[in-house]
Image (cartoon, rainbow, N blue to C red):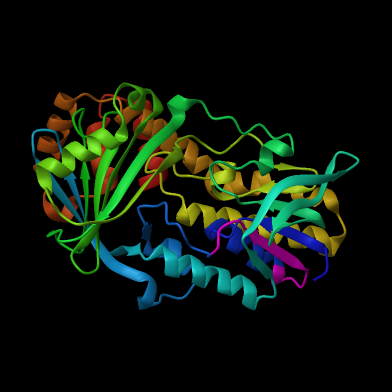
Amino acid sequence: MTDIFDIIVVGAGPAGSMAARFAAEQGVSVLMLEKDRDVGYPVRCGEAISKKGVEEFIPLDEKWISSKISKFSLNSPDGTEVVIEFNDSGFILERRIFDYELAKTAANAGALILTRAYVNGLLFDDNRVSGVKYEFRGEQKEARAKIVIGADGVESRIGRWAGIETFTDFRDMECCVQVTASNIKIDPGTLYFYFGKNVAPGGYFWVFPKAGCSANIGLGISGYEGKKKSALSYLNDFMEKNYPEVPVLTSIAGGVPSIPTLKKISAPGILLAGDAGRQVNPLSGGGIASGMIGGSIAGRIAGESIKLNKPDHILTYDNEWYERIGKRHEIYNRLKNGVYNFDDERFNKIAKSFSNVSADKRSLGKLFAIALVNHPLLLIDIMKVFI
């Protein structure tokens, strides 16, 4: 195997695979390195995504669709439930299969993929990133490239090694924990959300249905709340109350950056995509679709840079990401700060008011309008993203 490439992508999640694919499609040489044994494993995700978010990048395939979602169920602290119906709005994925198929699109485009390749350093030439150091099959290796794309997740070291400011305050880092449990009898087409200080203070609790009467059940709370009571404790309380003694198939925990994108996601010789660049929706914590968007932009711009022989072309990445979706994430962050600080009484009033809206007129935009009726500046933000 050659040790010189045009582009090296670190991480084979959705962002990394799209970066590798969109670069390789332009005829440049691409190497994608994944530290784990298998692409798509372990799964650290609620696995929910909109249909639109998938269709942009890969044809729909039943083998990685676990559930088809058409409703949201919003549950306030006093038990008031309000359902919003959509038409064919989204899916719960089988991420192990989905991520694998995304990586195959990169391979089919010409990218070389190595798993169990643990990147442990960067190479530099004149303060410009020029490759990576990595361990593969017990041997220390080096691979050089004109551009490195860091798609190595929320704990990314690539950006930090390159001198990009990646620090996230613990108060902006969501503490998340989730189990996948069986024998869960819920509507297979509905996403269930729960709010309140006793289930997920400063965040939300979810129950996402999967095939075979199973479900992803978890929550995310701010690091500040997590210091007072762990996310796992809230999960255990919910399970004991609602689903005692159900079989638990998997358990995961981790952090999700609940902030807008990093101020800089590019530097000489390097780009950051996905969770590594904090390209996560701050309101929902979802990062699959936005990660694929970020990765596709990074890969395309990197490929263009190589073909044009213009190294600094990659520095246009920040602005292109911002115009595509980054500025919308800033709005979502303001909405998050407006909503997740509500007390239980406020959540109950919102649910009761929204329950008076006829089912055919219910929407997320209408819900936020009711929730933030006393916040006129945030109502303008709602109009920008929902109307």
Residue sitting at the far front? 138
Does residue 63 belong to the magenta stretch? no
Q: Quadrant of residue 337?
A: top left
Q: Quadrant of residue 197?
A: top left
> In the visual, does 181 lie left or right of 274?
left
The residue lying at 66 percent from left, 68 percent from top is: 113
The residue lying at 33 percent from left, 42 percent from top is: 177
Which quarter of the image is occupied by the N terminus?
A: bottom right
- Residue 143 seen in the figure: yes
> In the visual, does 13 lie left or right of 206?
right
> In the visual, does 159 lie left or right of 358?
right
The front one of 187 and 141 is 141
Residue 154: give x, y in percent of width and height: 53, 42
Residue 137: give x, y in percent of width and height: 68, 62
Q: Give the total number of marks visible in the rendering.
A: 0
Residue 282: give x, y in percent of width and height: 43, 39
- Residue 387 seen in the figure: no
The residue lying at 53 percent from left, 65 percent from top is: 38
Q: Quadrant of residue 52?
A: bottom left
The front one of 256 and 58 is 256
Span of residues in magenta: 24-37
Figure check: 339 above or below 109: above
The residue lying at 76 percent from left, 73 percent from top is: 27
